[in-house]
């Protein structure tokens, strides 16, 4: 694939793995003599914006990170707006693995030199066409041949000199040692492999969305529990404050109530942050920025 590269990197992918491997990727791109620029993402929306601008500029969009940034960028380019190169830099990298892309992003860069642009859905169409061609090779063929000219020592036109020949040839290979059948079986196997790969990728995406949705639901439930505990701690602290003013409880008991309130409020804030983080994970998994009410909705 020719052309400059816009390398979109998720700096947080794989707990910093993408950033650690970035110098090696840059060195490989320089060795290829390829023009490139590096953009670090700050959010899914930022990654999509960068991909959109790079595609409009005619650049190859290289997503370096995990399945989150890959899904976000692929979603932006899904209508054929540009070319996507995947450089695995996250933990799972399931999408890249299903497509047979090396787990090492430096090795994946080599596909920019030797790889062929391909749509995932076109792989299935190509496999189906290969099966169709293999089947047709078993069919009998009918050929028509026509020949005309002049004959004799002297080239002349007229009776006795002109001739024409027409032939109809019917060919049917009754036995070829199983070669045609083997080609059909091979084409069918390739087609099944592509179908299974598509189904695997689709299932993986559905699983990621479902898991992200479940984590968000759990986080929201935890937030409700944390809010209730914070409310209870505030009520207990108000009671402890009145009792302290009345001299009913000791200073130690008052400090314990205040510490319990501080801990409950801190836990409430941490849980709120966890909900936001799970919300962002689901946005990455869906690659749309829209949160469904139910998984798959």
Image (tube, rainbow, N blue to C red):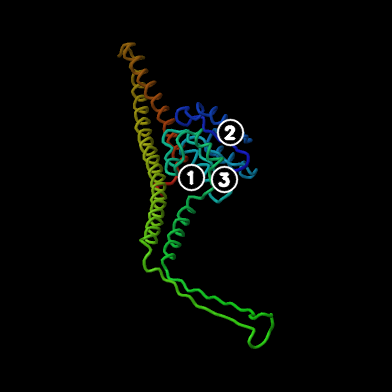
User: What percent of the width, then of the height, locates residue 84?
Assistant: 54, 43
- Cβ atoms under marks 2 and 3 closer than 8 Å: no
- Residue 29 is marked as 2
| Residue at left offset 40%, top offset 28% | 268
Rounded to the nearest whole Å, what is the CA distance between mark 2 and mark 1? 35 Å
* 21 over 118 or under it: above or below: above
- Residue 83 is marked as 3
- Cβ atoms under marks 3 and 1 closer than 8 Å: no
Marks 2 and 1: which is nearer the front? 2
* 196 over 139 or under it: above or below: above
Q: Residues within 10 Å of mark 1 (few under 14, many from 20)?
A: few
User: What percent of the width, then of the height, locates residue 75?
Assistant: 51, 46
The number of callouts visible is: 3
> In the structure shown, which secondary structural element does the residue marked by tag 3 occupy?
loop
| Residue at left offset 59%, top offset 42% | 60
Marks 2 and 3: which is nearer the front? 2
In the depicted view, which residue is nearer to us: 290 or 158? 158
Looking at the image, the residue that sits furthest to the bottom is: 159
In the depicted view, which residue is nearer to us: 131 or 10? 131
User: What percent of the width, then of the height, locates residue 19?
Assistant: 51, 28
Location of mark 1 (residue) = 290
| Residue at left offset 44%, top offset 56% | 127
Q: Is residue 85 left or right of residue 293?
A: right
> In the structure shown, which secondary structural element does the residue marked by tag 2 occupy?
helix
């Amino acid at each position: 694939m020719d052309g400059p590269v816009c390398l979109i990197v998720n700096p947080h992918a794989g707990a910093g793995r993408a950033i650690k491997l970035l110098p090696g990727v840059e060195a490989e791109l320089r060795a290829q003599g390829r023009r490139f620029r590096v953009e670090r993402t700050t959010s899914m929306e930022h990654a999509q914006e960068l991909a959109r601008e790079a595609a409009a500029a005619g650049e190859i969009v290289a997503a370096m990170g995990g399945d989150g940034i890959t899904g976000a960028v692929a979603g932006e380019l899904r209508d054929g707006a540009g070319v996507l190169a995947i450089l695995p830099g996250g933990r799972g990298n399931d999408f890249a693995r299903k497509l047979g892309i090396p787990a090492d992003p430096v090795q994946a860069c080599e596909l920019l030199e030797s790889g062929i642009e391909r749509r995932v859905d076109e792989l299935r169409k190509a496999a189906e066409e290969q099966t169709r061609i293999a089947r047709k090779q078993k069919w009998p063929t009918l050929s028509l041949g026509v020949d005309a000219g002049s004959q004799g020592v002297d080239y002349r036109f007229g009776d006795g000199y002109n001739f024409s020949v027409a032939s109809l040839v019917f060919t049917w290979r009754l036995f070829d040692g199983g070669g045609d059948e083997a080609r059909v079986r091979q084409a069918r196997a390739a087609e099944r492999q592509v179908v299974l790969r598509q189904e695997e990728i689709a299932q993986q995406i559905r699983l990621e969305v479902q898991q992200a949705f479940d984590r968000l639901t759990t986080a929201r439930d935890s937030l409700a529990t944390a809010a209730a505990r914070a409310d209870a701690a505030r009520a207990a602290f108000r009671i402890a404050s009145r009792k302290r003013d009345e001299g009913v409880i000791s200073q130690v008991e008052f400090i314990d109530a205040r510490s319990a309130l501080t801990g409950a409020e801190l836990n409430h804030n941490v849980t709120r942050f966890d909900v936001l983080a799970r919300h962002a994970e689901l946005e990455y998994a869906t690659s749309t920025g829209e949160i469904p009410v139910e998984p798959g909705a």
